[in-house]
């Protein structure tokens, strides 16, 4: 058995988010010398069941094995009859971890350092497009490169978030959001503190904010502002028939998500 190859695969599995519990079964599979093999993995994120299958193949020229990909299957507690599947491929660079894969499948965005075909590193936000899929049934992953102009820290600074006042808490908050987590944050409003949940939204260069019932706070406020603005326009047009209406500044804000159960924050 190629010991260096075994150690490399063990580290690769570990740092892709599958822990150290698969070492023995990995060793047994390699010892059999088969051209391909799979290793199952089961975990839960919150109340959702996450089944994974890790795929390995042997080199046709040497005794080395490669960790090629893993397929993730998510089954939600509140909808056990529906299962979502997606395959994530392993590259030489910074791979998508299991938790990041889960976050992508939940519709959130993940920030990664990736490697292009020329071997050059670049930074990008990733978000799954549930309207487009390939021939294998995998949803397309959209990329928002650094030139797209999404600055997470600058976006957070627009909101009265208490954690931003402490550099350590701020760093932890930013890191968690970049991993695609739905993160709790303390909002300070009119002298009161209110716990809410936020997630990065690179596509619209903002953050999504949810209350304790997982209702979109910003969208609900935006709707109220739209109604108020519409009423204001109506009054203006009655008094100034030639005045042109103001462009709707909220037209690019995405629609509110359906009500979800309060998540477990990790």
Image (cartoon, rainbow, N blue to C red):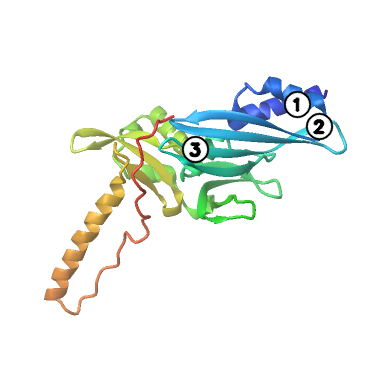
Position of residue 131 measured from the top left corner of the image (x, y, whole percent): 51, 56
In space, the residues marked 3 and 2 are separated at their CA atoms by: 31 Å
**Residue 181, relative to residue 208: is it above or below?**
above
- The residue sitting at 69% across, 25% down in the picture is 10
> Contact, CB < 8 Å: mark 1 with mark 3?
no
Q: Nearer the viewer, mark 1 or mark 3?
A: 3
- The quarter of the picture where the N terminus appears is top right
State the mark number for residue 90: none
| Mark 3 nearby-residue class (10 Å; few <14, some 14–19, many ≥20) | some
In space, the residues marked 1 and 3 are separated at their CA atoms by: 28 Å
In space, the residues marked 2 and 1 are separated at their CA atoms by: 8 Å
The residue labelled by disc 2 is 34
State the mark number for residue 75: 3
Q: Is residue 189 visible?
A: yes
Dividing the picture into quadrants, the one containing residue 252 is bottom left
Answer with mark 1 or mark 3, whichever residue precedes in sequence.
1
**Residue lying furthest front in this view?**
81
SS at mark 3? strand
> Contact, CB < 8 Å: mark 3 with mark 2?
no
**Residue lying furthest right in this view?**
61
- The residue sitting at 62% across, 43% down in the picture is 87
> Contact, CB < 8 Å: mark 2 with mark 1?
yes
The residue labelled by disc 1 is 29
């Amino acid at each position: 058995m190629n010991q260096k190859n075994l150690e490399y695969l063990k580290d690769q599995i570990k740092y892709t988010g599958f822990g150290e519990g698969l070492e023995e079964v990995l060793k047994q599979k390699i010892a059999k010398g088969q051209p391909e093999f799979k290793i199952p993995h089961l975990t839960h994120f919150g109340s959702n069941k996450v089944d994974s299958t890790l795929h390995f193949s042997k080199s046709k020229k040497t005794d080395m094995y490669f960790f090629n990909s893993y397929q993730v299957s998510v089954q939600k507690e509140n909808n056990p009859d529906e299962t979502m599947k997606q395959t994530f491929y392993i590259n030489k660079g910074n791979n998508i971890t299991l938790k990041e894969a889960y976050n992508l499948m939940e519709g959130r965005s993940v920030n990664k350092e990736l490697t292009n075909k020329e071997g050059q590193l670049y930074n990008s936000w990733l978000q799954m497009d549930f309207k487009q899929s390939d021939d294998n049934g995998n949803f397309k992953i959209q990329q928002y490169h650094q030139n797209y102009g999404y600055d997470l820290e600058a976006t957070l600074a627009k909101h009265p978030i208490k954690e931003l006042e402490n550099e350590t808490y701020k760093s932890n908050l930013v890191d968690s959001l970049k991993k695609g987590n739905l993160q709790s944050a303390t909002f300070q409003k009119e002298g009161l503190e209110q716990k809410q949940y936020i997630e990065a939204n690179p596509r619209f260069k903002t953050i999504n904010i949810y209350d304790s019932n997982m209702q979109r706070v910003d969208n609900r406020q935006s709707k109220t502002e739209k109604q108020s603005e519409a009423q204001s326009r109506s009054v203006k047009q009655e008094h100034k028939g030639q005045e042109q209406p103001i462009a709707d500044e909220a037209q690019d804000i995405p629609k509110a998500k359906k009500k979800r159960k309060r998540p477990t924050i990790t």
